[in-house]
Image (cartoon, rainbow, N blue to C red):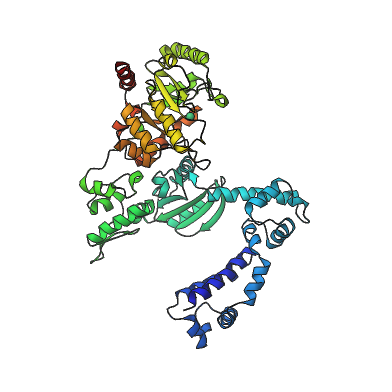
Amino acid sequence: MRNAEVAGFLDEIADLLELMGNNRFRVGAYRNAATRIQSMPESVESVWRAGQLQEVPGIGPSIAAKVSEWLQTGGSRYLEVLRRLVPPGVRELLTVPGLGPAKAQLIHRSLGITTLAELEEAAREHRLRQLPGIREKTENKILRELERLRDRSRRLLLGVALPAAEEVVRLMQHHPAVRKIQPAGSLRRMQETIGDIDILASSEQPAEVTQAFARLPIVKEVLALGPTKASVLTTDNLQMDLRAVQPEEYGSALQYFTGDKQHNIALRNIAISKGLKLSEYGLFDESTGERLASEEEADIYRALGLEWMPPEIRTNRGELDAAAKGTLPRLVRQEDIRGDLQVHSCWSDGTASIETMAEACRVLGYGYVAITDHSQALGVAHGLSPERLEQKLREIDQLNPRLAPFRVLKAAEVDIRSNGALDYPDDLLAQLEVVVVSIHSGFEQDRERITERILRAFQNPHAHILAHPTGRLLNRRPGYEVDLEQVLRAAAKAGIAVEINGSPDRLDLDDVWARRAKELGVKITINTDAHAPLNLQAMRYGVAVARRAWLEKGDILNTLPLDQLLAFFGRRRQRRRRAA
Ligand SMILES: [Zn+2]
């Protein structure tokens, strides 16, 4: 059978026509023909021999002629012409919107450019505008489009996607046609990065909902608009997809579109084992066809003999078993958090005074905050010398009576130097109530050295919390090489807490390692690493990671009231003193 081969050459024609900016009906005709031939039960060659090619739906005289030439000669003159017109080096350039075949050819031939990276470099060096017919304006537009392409191929940070989706929900929820509306997909599961932003609504008039969505002021471009689905690009260049379903199907659609995929596959298998069928339209009895549940998500789980479970843990890593046995964890909630243990002020690289940060924490309902400005080694972040730190501690002493019963804790984010020593002398560390230790330099050290370095820092009796344990920045840099298993085991033994850093570009530890930390008996703190009052909002992202890691209130140190928190940190010092 040569069907796949024939479909392949028709697809290549479609690709090249599309790259050259041909109209989509012509492109679509080739794609359609390719699909038909690919899925034909009989051999395309025998159909052609019988002279019946044109009787296949979707194959007109022009495509039939090309197919018969291919089957006879193994080639296509038309395809050869297209390949010459769009050589491989030009193909990538044509993916830039607004860059047509003529200009792409010119750029390719005159400058030898074959990749988007080379194109960007040439545009930045103003080499494009030296070509005939390319003006400064075109050059700038190419740069903008390249940036947009990059944005779209990158996964979105939860901290970007969630506020954007919530804004849409806010704008849409009072629309008369909307019954219910909320984010679905990876966003509802609070995954650290998001592919597409999916929103689900219920309505008796779904078409009115998709139209209202497409008309929102934040919409820059409508990519697709139908009676139940719409897809738009926002003014921030985020792609958002909205789906509107009938109210009686909302629960099953929400369950289905929340995922994740592995969870849904496992759930469907549970349904099958009970003689039921689960889809986005509901849970059905396989034999009678009767719909057993669909309006409420919880009804579907219940009808399958399962407790409803929070979306964050729907990853098929044991949650279905636990839901069947009634042993699901009681996940930590944002309301459980009583304070933030990594916050920076303008003493180092923060933007606000200690008092302002403390006031902001009080507004959030917290009882305490640790102001953890950087230590001296971190010159770029205006790390504090020992003298400056002592001045800062005096400021805190003056501030606390005014803020009582709220407490500003004397603290610092102390660098672990490249040899594992802490960046302040012990007598100064002894004056601090919370000592956060972390790595900000020497990322290039090998795995063994970095691991050793952290383990050595744990030997200091004044260290309390290891912050952002891998140093990664999402979308920007991977973390340093470190043996986390060994670090977590050592933390458990030494009584060091490990941080889930809630800053949306860190989320470090991640959910997988945070769950491992709990197994090993490590206490966790969820901190924001805020450098400005608004950053304190990032607590919700840190809590989301903790929830995805199955963590409960009791696993998180900063759910403790102040006296118990300080007792925990104090115990470590006492233990060390007794041992000494
Ligand atoms: Zn830090």
Residue at screen point 23% across, 66% down = 288
Say if 120 sits above or below 507 in the image: below
Say if 531 sits above or below 182 in the image: above
Residue 105: give x, y in percent of width and height: 70, 61
> 473 or 248: nearer the eye?
473
Residue 1: give x, y in percent of width and height: 46, 79
* Residue 502 seen: no
Residue furthest out toward the left: 325
> 292 or 368: nearer the eye?
368
Judge from the rendering whether residue 436 lies leftward or rightward of residue 10; answer left or right. Answer: left
Say if 286 sits above or below 182 in the image: below
Residue 158: give x, y in percent of width and height: 46, 42
Residue at screen point 50% across, 54% down = 231
Judge from the rendering whether residue 531 lies leftward or rightward of residue 301; answer left or right. Answer: right
Locate the C terminus and report the quarter of the image it occupies: top left
> 352 or 103: nearer the eye?
103
* Residue 4 seen: yes
Residue furthest out toward the bottom: 50
Q: How many marks?
A: 0
Judge from the rendering whether residue 277 lies leftward or rightward of residue 166; answer left or right. Answer: left
Q: Quadrant of residue 508?
A: top left
Residue at screen point 50% across, 38% down = 473
Residue 548: give x, y in percent of width and height: 35, 42
